Image (cartoon, rainbow, N blue to C red):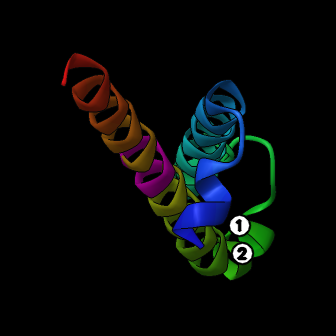
Amino acid sequence: MIQSLKQIDPEIRKWVARILILFGIAIAYSPYWIDSILEKEILESMSGPMMSVGWWILGLGLVLYFFNMWLEIKSENKNTD
């Protein structure tokens, strides 16, 4: 899996990580800001699953972000040697 991620363009990986982080934050914290939009019954039934999915998306985005940083540091070290 790491080899297949390395083959993707670094700029695309960065944008995907940023988008996942932003969506993860928006979904994980949506019960707090979406309160004024939806009715209370709908919000209570959806808040648990939405927060879980949001945290997973946020976590995936952070893993991809740190993976990108690790690859950049690794490539810089190879270039200096």
Image quadrant where residue 19 sits: top right
* Contact? badges 2 and 1 (CB < 8 Å): yes
Kind of residue at disc 1: Leu
Q: Position of residue 15 (x, y in %)?
A: 67, 29
Q: Position of residue 11 (x, y in %)?
A: 66, 24
Residue 43's disc number: 1
Q: In the rendered view, does 46 fall on the left or right side of 73?
A: right
Magenta residues span 62-66
Q: Position of residue 13 (x, y in %)?
A: 64, 38
Q: Nearer the viewer, residue 72 or 42?
A: 72
- Compared with 36, 44 (above or below) is below
Q: Which type of secondary structure does the marked residue at label 2 adopt?
A: helix
Q: Residue at horizontal 80%, vertical 71%? A: 42
Q: Residue at horizontal 54%, vertical 42%? A: 21
Q: Residue at horizontal 54%, vertical 75%? A: 52
Residue 46's disc number: 2
Q: Position of residue 81 (x, y in %)?
A: 18, 25
